[in-house]
Image (cartoon, rainbow, N blue to C red):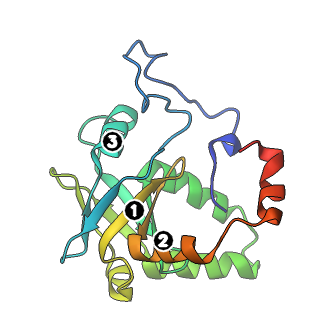
Amino acid sequence: MTEHFENRPADEQETSVEAAGGESSAWDDLQVGFIGNPKTKMDERGRIKMPAEFKAFIDKKYGKGFNAFYITSRDGLTAEIYPMPEWIRHQAKIFKMPPSLPARKKLLERYNLYGDRADMDPQGRMLFPDELRNKGVLTGEVKVSGEGHFLRVTSLKMLRESVEQGEITAQDEEALAPFDV
């Protein structure tokens, strides 16, 4: 259910700083969303500081002083950080699924267990929800990866282990070929 910018409804308004008469930079394409993957640290209180490039993008897209986010996880191993307007759109997609769908129930259970609203303080720090912090997986150095309309936070140690164990195979290359990446 990872959301990509291509999947955005055609009638949903999207703008860019260039179109609004602003200056252009690598972070100005508001149609693409968050891109990049800076490293940061989770402090002993369970907070991360929003990397500067993402903070600048948030200021451009949502306005200076925007601080409303929803942090959750599907698996308890990585975290998803959604600006609140994106979380509301994402949640609306889930609520359109039939309530009797077992996968919908599982997804909502995980999002509810691990998730909570997080307000970014003036220094750009956000406190992760208790249940997610209690898993103890997201500690120390983490990667914050832009995934379009949300950010994914992954333990740098776990990410390195995953990359080392999971070589890209010929079948993976074949599966990726139609996407020209």
- Residue indicated by mark 1: 143
Residue 30 vs 98, above or below: the answer is above
Q: Point out the image quarter for the N terminus.
A: bottom right
Q: Measuring 40% from the left and 66% from the top, which residue is drawn there? A: 71
Q: Amino acid at mark 2?
A: Leu
Q: Measuring 25% from the left and 55% from the top, which residue is drawn there? A: 120
User: For the view shown, which residue lies furthest in the top direction?
Assistant: 21
Q: Earlier in the sequence, mark 1 or mark 3?
A: 3
In the picture provided, is 65 more to the left or to the right than 9? left
Which of discs 2 and 3 lies nearer the camera? The answer is 2
Q: Earlier in the sequence, mark 2 or mark 1?
A: 1
Q: CA distance from mark 2 to mark 3?
A: 21 Å
Q: How many marks?
A: 3
Q: Secondary structure at mark 2?
A: helix
User: Front-most of 132 and 176?
Assistant: 176
- Residue indicated by mark 2: 159
User: Front-most of 3 and 96?
Assistant: 3
Check disc 2: other Cα within 10 Å, few if <14, some if 14-19, many if 20+.
some
Give x and y (percent) for residue 45.
Answer: 18, 76
Check disc 3: other Cα within 10 Å, few if <14, some if 14-19, many if 20+.
some
Q: Amino acid at mark 3?
A: Glu
User: Front-most of 14 and 30?
Assistant: 30
Residue 67 vs 156, above or below: the answer is above
Give x and y (percent) for residue 89.
Answer: 56, 52
